[in-house]
Image (cartoon, helix red, strand yellow):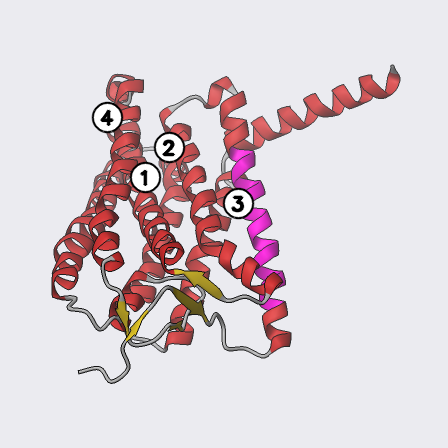
Amino acid sequence: MYKNKTIVEYFILEGFSYSPELQIMVFVVVLFIYLIVFGGNMMILILICLERHLHTPMYFFLANLSIVDIFFTISVLHKIFTNFMTGDKTVSFHGCMIQSFTAGSFTIHELYILTAMSFDRYVAICVPLRYQLVMNQRTCVALASLCWSLGFISICPHTLLLSGFSCYTSIEVNHFLCDIILLMKMTCSDTSVLEILFVIEGWLLFTISPFILTFVPYIFIIIAIMKIRTTTGRSKAFYTCSSHFTIVILLYTMNVMQYMIPINLEYKKLYTLINTVVVPLLNPLIYSLKNKDIKNALRKRRTFWCNRSVLLIHF
């Protein structure tokens, strides 16, 4: 039996257990990265919307990925900014449940959108002659809708069950966000149903499944690339999917470090922070620096606005 049982109406997010000076430095660094994440992903979204030659399946899914990164970062980091600026580390019970839901759902969104992107790369490289037929607008919208639906539907049962628990051993959460697994360990209610749900749905359906569905197409992609006779052709084929593959490797590595390896809680918070800000930061950086279409579109828009500025100054 638990000795200290509390019916909670709010939680206290302890955040990072650093000195005030280090917390200021962490806040400044996180804020700086957040601004780059928001600006970079918004830039990609705007470019894809404005440039007609970017209205292709690959960039359609990239736009969805940028939307996920923006909202995922906002849902997690807004409490860090609020807590630091106001000094109030409390979050209401319902606010905590909402953050658990949004953080979990956007994580699953990203995993499945990356899965859809790997399928797109498989069709483009392995069956290029049927690419336009397979990856038509209807297919792309259906895949994107499925990815978004899975993210919201999958986390709903976990959040609903957790929100029904009013008894907790403490109101102090040793984290900078309302982590659903940490809250489950803190409750003094019966969590057997929630634990079974995590194993069956969380790991099998929404962790292992997207992992397999993401990496299996790359096995066929690598086989298809190795059959290309020319070195130039192989390099071009590798180049078209290297950006996406880099993001996939990094994201799954961070998820493994965050959830599957037993580590000190302070290190777990660090990996969560990396997963929250660094991975969304690398998405626009990698796709912008390595992608010729994005760079050309950005150069074209920059020239367009420079010319307009010159004309306005002239008149």
- In x, y percent, where is residue 222? 26, 42
Q: In the rendered structure, which segment of residues is drawn in magenta?
A: 25-44
Alpha-carbon distance for marks 2 and 1? Answer: 7 Å
In the rendered image, the vertical position of residue 44 relative to residue 210, given as above or below: above
Task: Give the image location of residue 311, x and y in percent.
Answer: 81, 17
Amino acid, disc 2 = Phe
Kindly identify the residue that appears in the image at 50 percent across and 32 percent down: 45
Determine which of the numbered discs, if any, sits on residue 312 in the image.
none
Looking at the rendered structure, the secondary structure element under dot 1 is helix
What residue is disc 3 on?
285
- Earlier residue among tags 3 and 1: 1
Q: Which residue is mark 1?
A: 113
First in residue order: circle 2 vs circle 3: 2
Residue 218 shows up from this direction: no
Predominant SS of the magenta segment = helix
Earlier residue among tags 4 and 2: 2
For mark 4, what is the residue?
Answer: 127
The reply to whether callout 4 and callout 3 are in contact (CB within 8 Å) is no
Name the N-terminal-most of marks 2 and 1.
Answer: 2
**C-alpha gap between disc 1 and disc 4:** 21 Å
Of mark 1 and mark 4, the one earlier in the sequence is 1
Q: Residues within 10 Å of mark 1 (few under 14, many from 20)?
A: many
Query: Measured along the vertical axis of the image, is residue 303 above or below residue 149?
Result: above
> Mark 2 sits on what residue?
61
What is the quadrant of the N terminus in the image? bottom left
The answer to the question of whether label 2 and label 1 lie on touching residues, with beta carbons closer than 8 A, is yes
